[in-house]
Amino acid sequence: MTARQAPRSRGPRDARWRTLVLTAIVIAAGGIVIAAVPDDGAFSRLFSTASAPPGGQAPTIDPARQEIHQRFQQGVIMLHAKQHEHAMTAFHRVLELDPALPEAHVNMGFALIGLERYSAARDFFESAMTLRKDQVNAYYGLAVALDGMGDRAGAIGAMRTFVHLSRPDDPYLRKAQAALWEWEEGKMRVP
């Protein structure tokens, strides 16, 4: 540019760079969320049916099991992002493929709590407990759903069960104990 040329006025910035950066941030955040989701062995049974094909090649995984895993992880990400409708869609597909997966019932319940559909959420938490009596987080969700329905006594009972069954290092244990204290003192609802 010569001294006599006026600098060009900048028009609207190219949105492609912002979009690229935003996409990279969303992908990184999704990876962090997936890495932070504890794997308590729930998916080990999903992939335990892998078998080695003839010729000693790497084991193959059933495509339905791959889809279950992928949809479940998508649902978890949507729950963390508070995109409850999208989470419900993902967990609905998981339940179509594996209706006996208690973790999917629990997470569907939490998606319904996010939409304040407490009665339907209660049903999913109860079905998770029917499938696996020691599905601890189902008791927490059931307590929140019952409280949302105005059943404080039921909520206290479910939360006591959660506290009783929880490991001492459970990240929700303190929140559950606080909820019990507030409920027993007749105070507010706990989300």
Image (cartoon, rainbow, N blue to C red):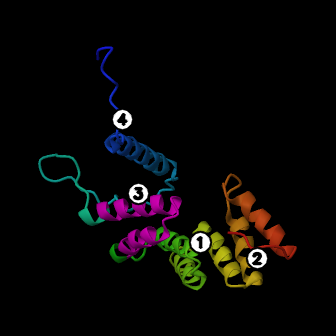
Q: Is residue 120 left or right of residue 176?
A: left
Q: What amino acid is found at the position of numbered circle 2 in the picture? A: Ile
Rate crowding at label 1 as few (under 14), some (14 to 19) or many (20 or more) other CA atoms within 10 Å. Answer: many
**Upstream in the sequence, badge 3 or badge 1?**
3
Circles 2 and 1: CB atoms closer than 8 Å: no
> Is residue 88 shown above or below 71?
below
Rate crowding at label 4 as few (under 14), some (14 to 19) or many (20 or more) other CA atoms within 10 Å. Answer: few
> Which residues, given as a range, are shown in magenta?
66-95
> Is residue 70 shown above or below 134?
above
Disc 1 secondary structure class: helix
Q: What amino acid is found at the position of numbered circle 1 in the picture? A: Ala
Residue 46 location (% of width, % of height): 36, 62
Residue 176 location (% of width, % of height): 73, 64
Residue under label 2: 156
Label 3, label 2: how far apart the Cα atoms are: 33 Å
Instruction: Give the dominant element type of the magenta stretch: helix, strand or loop.
Output: helix
Q: Residue at x 46, y 70 (%)?
A: 104
